[in-house]
């Protein structure tokens, strides 16, 4: 039976109306609505109570409590007093159970009683993740402010109440803790953090003894970060931390030594290349990220420093500032497990003494490397190579049978850059792709800033790559951006 056009239109209208009615949120069960609202930021979750009386109290079981300026966008003049009042109002109305994550991010001074009250709420609600960021600084500005200004000597800084997280007080539910811009003084008999898997200390005033007390207590730590802590001279953990696999130490300005009894899988370190890094074993250390201050060249540190003693490192990211020429290596280490090397090098100085061609030795150091990233930032006057500058140098070729991908950025076409690119191209027998890019890709860190370069630098780099590198490319693997 064939329907009339009018009947078909009526049926379609009824179907659309039925679909619309089926999508009404008010028709969903309360527990489903609560689950949906729990996925919203706490500010948005509270505002859903204005839509329906039925929804008024659904946010009170919210599991993610994040309090920052973004939580209260309607308050233009959000000072400390207003922020504390608003946070207290929300916590007083919350059910106080089932909180998975609680975050306070606001510049707070002389507010110990208020913050203590919030920490007690987190402990009572069995919060698993607690973040207290009492600074108005981003990580980018934290180091220069802490080094050159008495930022942490101001009165009113909060001292975190370690006793509130003691196992006897219910702190055993905490699994992740991040503290920023405060004091931390754990006692020698501290027994908290029984189930803590992740600990981040950022801009925290803590002593060597304090860190040792934290790490000596029974713990199941898997990830530890200690960054921008300007009092620390030594990070020492005499007891074996059998579960600690990830360590990040970033810009502790007076740190002289790291000595830990653990078997890491990843290490992220920024500091002086002279800082001894001593671990009970490095048999599992496969991923390493180092940013070192300019006490030696990057190649020297790879040959004689901490990296040369890593037996199974597979991925190495190394950031170094170069001022001088590398020492000609007499005996090269062999990183036979290294598959991916990312080298960021910053070259300073007028009439620079550094020689980019020295990095050709990396092919011998990592004979099984498959991917090489070389990101350069040369902040020194130098013209691009031309035949008037003399013949291009060449090193003896050691055929590399595993390198497949190469990326070079900050390529301005200077003579030693061209020589290195040609050496890599001619030595790599299975190379599939070499990308040469004149643009600077290094993200500035701390006090570093990208040099101001005109368009001619990028044109010079492109032209030099096309004229000298592409002409030597008989496999069509070079791509000039």
Image (spheres, rainbow, N blue to C red):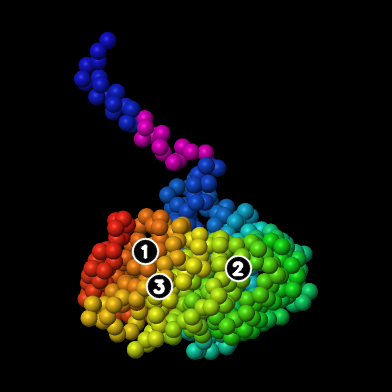
Label 3 crowd (10 A; few <14 / some 14-19 / many >=20): few
Q: Is residue 2 visible?
A: yes
Q: Are marks 2 and 1 in contact (CB under 8 Å)?
A: no
Query: At 53% across and 89% down in the image, what residue appears?
Result: 150
Q: Is residue 177 visible?
A: no
Quarter where residue 14 is shown: top left
Q: Nearer the viewer, residue 20 or 287?
A: 287
Q: Is residue 215 left or right of residue 356?
A: right
User: What distance separates the C-alpha of mark 2 from that of mark 1?
Assistant: 29 Å
Quarter where residue 469 is shown: bottom left
Residue at the spot of label 2: 310
Residue 130 point in image, percent of width and height: 60, 64
The boundaries of the magenta stretch are 18-29
Query: At 52% across and 42% down in the image, what residue appears?
Result: 32
Residue 481 point in image, percent of width and height: 27, 63
User: What distance separates the C-alpha of mark 3 from that of mark 2?
Assistant: 27 Å
| Secondary structure, magenta segment, majority class | helix
Q: Is residue 245 left or right of residue 461?
A: right
Query: At 50% across and 60% down in the image, what residue appears?
Result: 368
User: What distance separates the C-alpha of mark 1 from that of mark 3?
Assistant: 11 Å
Residue 478 point in image, percent of width and height: 31, 60
From the viewer's perspective, is residue 44 above or below residue 134? Answer: above
- How many circles with numbers are drawn on the protein? 3
Select label 3 or label 2 by which is in front: 3
Q: Nearer the viewer, residue 325 or 255?
A: 325
Residue at the spot of label 3: 395
Residue at the spot of label 1: 426
Sequence-earlier tag: 2 or 1: 2
From the viewer's perspective, is residue 200 above or below residue 23? Answer: below
Sequence-earlier tag: 3 or 2: 2
Label 1 crowd (10 A; few <14 / some 14-19 / many >=20): some
């Amino acid at each position: 039976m064939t329907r009339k056009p009018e009947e078909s239109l009526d049926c379609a209208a009824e179907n659309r109306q039925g679909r619309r009615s089926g999508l009404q949120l008010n028709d969903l069960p309360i527990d489903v609505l609560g689950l949906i609202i729990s996925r919203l930021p706490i500010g948005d979750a509270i505002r859903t109570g204005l839509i329906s009386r039925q929804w008024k109290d659904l946010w009170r079981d919210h599991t993610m409590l994040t309090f920052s300026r973004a939580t209260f966008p309607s308050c233009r003049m959000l000072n400390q007093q207003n922020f504390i009042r608003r946070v207290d109002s929300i916590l007083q109305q919350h059910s106080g159970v089932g909180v998975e994550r609680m975050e306070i991010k606001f510049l707070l001074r002389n507010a110990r009683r208020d913050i203590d009250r919030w920490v007690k709420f987190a402990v009572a609600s069995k919060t698993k993740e607690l973040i207290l960021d009492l600074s108005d600084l981003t990580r980018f500005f934290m180091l220069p402010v802490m080094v050159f200004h008495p930022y942490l000597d101001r009165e009113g800084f909060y001292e975190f109440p370690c006793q509130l997280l003691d196992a006897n007080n219910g702190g055993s539910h905490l699994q992740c803790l991040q503290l920023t811009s405060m004091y931390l003084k754990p006692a020698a008999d501290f027994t908290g953090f029984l189930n803590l898997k992740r600990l981040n200390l950022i801009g925290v005033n803590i002593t060597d003894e304090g860190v040792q007390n934290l790490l000596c207590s029974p713990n199941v730590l898997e990830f530890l970060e200690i960054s921008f802590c300007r009092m620390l001279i030594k990070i020492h953990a005499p007891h074996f931390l059998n579960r600690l696999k990830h360590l990040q130490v970033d810009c502790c300005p007076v740190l002289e030594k790291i000595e830990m009894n653990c078997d890491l899988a990843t290490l992220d370190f920024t500091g002086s290349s002279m800082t001894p890094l001593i671990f009970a074993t490095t048999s599992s250390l496969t991923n390493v990220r180092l940013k070192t201050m300019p006490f030696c060249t990057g190649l020297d540190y790879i040959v004689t420093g901490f990296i040369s003693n890593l037996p199974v490192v597979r991925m190495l990211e190394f950031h170094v500032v170069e001022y001088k020429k590398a020492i000609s290596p007499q005996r090269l280490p062999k990183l036979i497990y290294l598959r991916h090397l990312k080298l960021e090098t910053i070259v300073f100085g007028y009439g620079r003494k550094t020689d980019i061609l020295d990095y050709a030795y990396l092919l011998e150091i990592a004979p099984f490397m498959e991917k090489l990233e070389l990101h350069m930032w040369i902040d020194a006057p130098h013209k691009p190579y031309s035949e008037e500058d003399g013949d291009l140098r060449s090193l003896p070729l050691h055929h590399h049978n595993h390198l497949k991908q190469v990326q070079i950025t900050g390529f301005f076409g200077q003579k030693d850059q061209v020589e290195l690119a040609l050496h890599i191209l001619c030595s790599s027998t299975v190379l599939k792709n070499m990308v040469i890019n004149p643009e600077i890709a290094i993200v500035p860190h701390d006090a570093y800033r990208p040099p101001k370069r005109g368009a001619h630098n990028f044109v010079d780099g492109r032209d030099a790559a096309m004229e000298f590198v592409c002409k030597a490319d008989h496999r069509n693997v070079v791509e000039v951006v």
